[in-house]
Amino acid sequence: MLGIIAATAVTTAAALAVPVAGLLAHRAVRRSANAHLMRIDTPDGIDEQGFVRIGGIDQWISVRGEDRANPVLLELHGGPGAANSPYGARTRAWEEHFTVVRWDMRGAGLTFAHGGPSGQGGEPSFARLYADALEVVHHVRARLGVDRVVLLPSSFGTVFGLRLARSHPELFSAYVGTDQNVLEAGRDTSAYDATLERLRAAGKAKDAAELEAMGSDWRRWTPAQRTAYDKLCAGSDPLTLDTVKKVVLGSMWLSPLYSPARILAYFKGQGFSQPVTAGTHAFDDRADGTRFEVPFFVFQGALDVITPAARAKAFFDEVEAPVKAFALIEGASHFAALRRPDRFLELLLTHVRPVVTGGARATAG
């Protein structure tokens, strides 16, 4: 996912070069409307957005919800470096039913914009971010006075999420994965194979040759090759490309939190975060264990070409958990929860909230 957003941003910026004045006026109106939408004024609501000292540096954390009695939902974003801080307006309805905690990891989003490269505590690594994630969980539990939180990782964030849920079930009331990654030490090449097939079918011989030359084992790719793969994978699928343009870049452009300087920092943070994937090359999710001591849910884009639904479902079928459910989000590829936030909320309310609030609702999926 490293290269998709940045590469698409360059193309989109060129297309929007004129007329600048009208574009900026429209942006100002929409950002103002989103700021109004984001207001929380309920008696028992909470809206705290700012920097918290995590892992020795200032990291951006948002805690928002209309009722502090609601279950706490802690997001782990993907990328690496693809922070979720731009998406508040898209997921505003979630905050009626959950207290939503967003955290921009070191090297990502507003954390990177605030501290810059020199303020990230050195080169980011998987181990460092994993330790940060645990610290964030404990911070949220203490701040909100709860014993457990619902863990909601997406995309590369699910690599952290699976390991947190396995190792620390006492901290989580449920695991809810979306854009679910399943690492198998390089054995599964289904996404790579499908990308190569799409490129060939579209007559893009040069791109197909570039991908073939890289080989199918992503663990051997350089950061530049990983970025190139991300671009080819997303660019070869119209739905994914449309989602990046309209949902990801559109949300960033219209977010009250994002100035042009912060947008630029967002892309720089993704490049800065590239080394994180090196720490996952030996990971094997099946070998690490498919038994989870927490309710386990996966809600996946039916048309996801980056983390294919079939691979996620095959892993889910092997999972043993007290309660579990799997559901497809129709009409969505990657970024499924953001493309269809209404459908994702429906799944949260149908399957997850009853379980974490003491109900018994959930199906095998």
Image (cartoon, grey):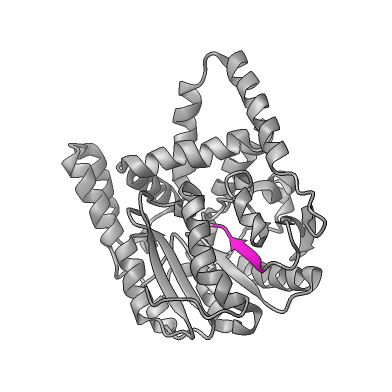
Q: Is residue 72 magenta?
A: yes
Identify the residue at horizontal 22%, vertical 46% (top origin).
Answer: 198
Left or right of 136: which side holds 345? left
In the depicted structure, whether residue 118 falls above or below residue 354: above
Identify the residue at horizontal 32%, vertical 67% (top origin).
Answer: 311
Camera-side residue: 313 or 15?
A: 313
Give the quarter of the figure containing the C terminus: bottom left
Quadrant in which residue 320 is drawn? bottom left
Which x, y percent locates residue 204?
21, 37
Q: Is residue 235 magenta?
A: no
Identify the residue at horizontal 50%, vertical 59% (top origin).
Answer: 346
Q: Which region shows up in magenta? A: 71-77
Identify the residue at horizontal 23%, vertical 56% (top origin).
Answer: 193
Q: Residue furthest right?
A: 43
Which x, y percent locates residue 33?
67, 33
Camera-side residue: 101 or 17?
A: 101
In the depicted structure, whether residue 11 falls above or below residue 128: above
